[in-house]
Amino acid sequence: MCGIFGYVGKENNSSIGIEALKRLEYRGYDSCGIAVFNAVKKNIGVEKVAGRISELEKKIAVKGIKGSAMIGHSRWATHGGPTVKNAHPHWDCHKDIHLVHNGIIENYKQIKDRLSKKGHKFISETDTEVLCHLIEEYATGSNGSKSYTLEEAVRRALGHVRGTYGIAVISKSDPNKIVAARMSSPLLIGVNDGEYVIASDPAAVITHTNKVIYLEDGDIAVLTKSGFRIADLNRAAQKRVEQELDWDVEEAQKGGYPHFMLKEIFEQPESLQNSIRGRLIQDEGMARLGGLEPVKERIKSIERVNILGCGTAYHAGLIGEYMFEEYAGVPCEVDFSAEFRYRKPIIDKNTAAIFVSQSGETADTLGALREAKEKGALCLGIVNTVGSSIVRMTDAGVYNHAGPEIGVASTKAFTSQLVVLALLTLYLGRLRGMSYVLGERIAKEIAKLPELTKTVLKQDNHIKEIAEKYKGAKSFLFIGRKYNYPIALEGALKLKEISYIHAEGLSAGELKHGHIALIDKNVPTIAIATRDSVYEKMLSNIQEIKARGGPVIAITTKGNTKLADIVDDIIYVPKNLEMLSPILTVIPLQLFAYHVAALNGRDVDKPRNLAKSVTVE
Ligand code: F6R
């Protein structure tokens, strides 16, 4: 999510850090900062801004901050709004230890409470700041231990932490070095003559050197200008292989993928994990949604839910409706944000209006939010971008934590919206009488999703072959029922928006009411037919299409080999709860749309006429 960078070496110029941060800007950012150790003055100069890297650059130039060991950060907020205080680097009570972090410290509240009681002063709302104070405890010996070196203090501090991190740390009292550590957040060392860099992303390294060493989970690295060493959390020395990157900056930003969209599709196991992390209380069959705590009592008394969103976010809302009504027993309606205000919706203080948005800035959704607020509804957000307008205007909400989405076509944000809606279903359901046994089952199935998505992604080559076969078609139909009806809509939208091929998504039951007239040998249908409560009905619809000579590509549950005899092409997804199946069935459709568009030479990441965030009505 965030980008981190560190440099130690022969140069004495903070512009190295600024240039690196600029190359990380593509990941999305809301604030940034840099800390530079100056060996002559023996101090650390810090500058942070809630804005663009170019603003940071100007400030640094004015202050003349210079030095030969530095750490920098471009932030994409998760805990705490995008303010200067929350921007990294963060520091300890003595302004000695400075640290940048990419990841999420799940148990930061407990650590913060404990350290606050001991007198530590926190100035930000971030999870990251606790790391500085934990390291301080060991570096100064203020927790009763002896004073440790920076490396050892970092190691001991990390022993208290649950979550993910890629960190880079510098200290005035243990100068001219960077200590870096990794756990489930990418981190690599760039190796050059007399200089070493550490970064979360090859894009920040590539203009210095193409020789890189990827750190592994549990690695702690110490970098000085004369070399580096890596050891694990138990102090055992580690050897990691040096690799040569033959990427340019743009390729590096895409992580070696030809397009951001493909990269983001493949990030879904990780983005789903981030959406779920710390939110499942498996043995209680419950979800922990910290953002909703302040309104928990009001949530208990709501009588109905309205979900609002546009495009892909609207499709997520449609699936949320099925989930809420089937499992949480709460009546639910879904509207296009753009229509909501024009139909005099009947809502009041017993209504929860849920606004689903990746950007948090969509003008239509903001308009619907104003309407719901005016009518006294409890307004909740499911938003990916921390600190965005929808977040600020809603009463409470749940963040997606899917990371920045750069490709215009929404992919990982969509699956994260679905998993958050599933968590919310569990939360609402358990507050409204869902049994412990059912709650536990849902929690268990949600936890499996990141692994299951990996098995779907493994079929990329097969899906590409299917795309090759059908890439010339002029029109497609997508059909599904119940939970997978909105996936038919989403599959069609994905294909339309990036390949410019006409596609229509339908409830399979609607086919015979008119649309079936479109079927012939040139109009392929993609049928989402998982083995679930509506499978037999889907099978009949598929047969109706086949009887009229239409080619059918089916997405079905692994093991359902019989369907292969009926349809033309088949893609299997693993079995999971029916309500969670859309998270698995949408991935082949994202890949199919991507490959058809790429094979037709479309500008996948920036399709014509579209913008990533639609801020006009
Ligand atoms: C489709 C897509 C759009 C957005 C819609 C809402 O791939 O990206 O349909 O889903 O414009 O945007 P957000 O979620 O930012 O409110």
Image (cartoon, rainbow, N blue to C red):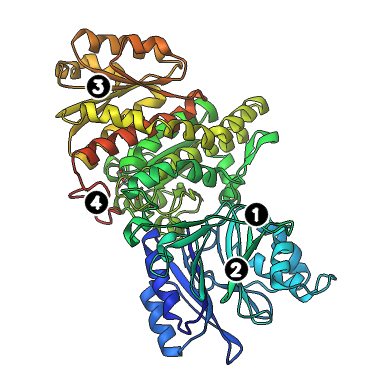
Asked whether the viewer can see residue 125, the reply is: no
- Looking at the image, tell me whether mark 2 or mark 3 is earlier in sequence order: 2
Q: Secondary structure at mark 4?
A: loop
Q: Amino acid at mark 2?
A: Phe
Q: Report the disc number at residue 218.
A: 1
In percent of width and height, residue 488 lies at 31, 28
Q: Nearer the viewer, mark 1 or mark 4?
A: 1
Q: Amino acid at mark 1?
A: Gly
**Residue tagged by mark 3?**
525
* Label 4: few (<14), some (14–19) or many (≥20) C-alpha neighbours in 10 Å: some
**Image check: 206 left or right of 219?**
left
Q: Residue furthest bottom?
A: 41
Q: Nearer the viewer, residue 557 or 517?
A: 557
* Label 3: few (<14), some (14–19) or many (≥20) C-alpha neighbours in 10 Å: many
In percent of width and height, residue 329 lies at 53, 28
- Looking at the image, tell me whether mark 2 or mark 1 is earlier in sequence order: 1
Ligand 1 closer than 8 Å to the CB at disc 1?
no
- The answer to whether mark 2 and mark 3 are in CB contact below 8 A is no
**Residue tagged by mark 2?**
228
- The answer to whether mark 2 and mark 1 are in CB contact below 8 A is no
Q: Amino acid at mark 4?
A: Lys
CA gap between label 2 and label 1 equals 16 Å
Q: Is 607 situated above or below 41?
A: above
Q: Nearer the viewer, residue 136 or 287?
A: 136
- Looking at the image, tell me whether mark 2 or mark 4 is earlier in sequence order: 2
Q: Report the disc number at residue 606.
A: 4
Q: Give the residue displayed 39% in from the left and 80% down from the top.
A: 57
In percent of width and height, residue 413 lies at 41, 45
Q: Amino acid at mark 3?
A: Thr
**Image check: 314 left or right of 276?**
left
CA gap between label 2 and label 4 equals 41 Å
- The answer to whether mark 2 and mark 4 are in CB contact below 8 A is no
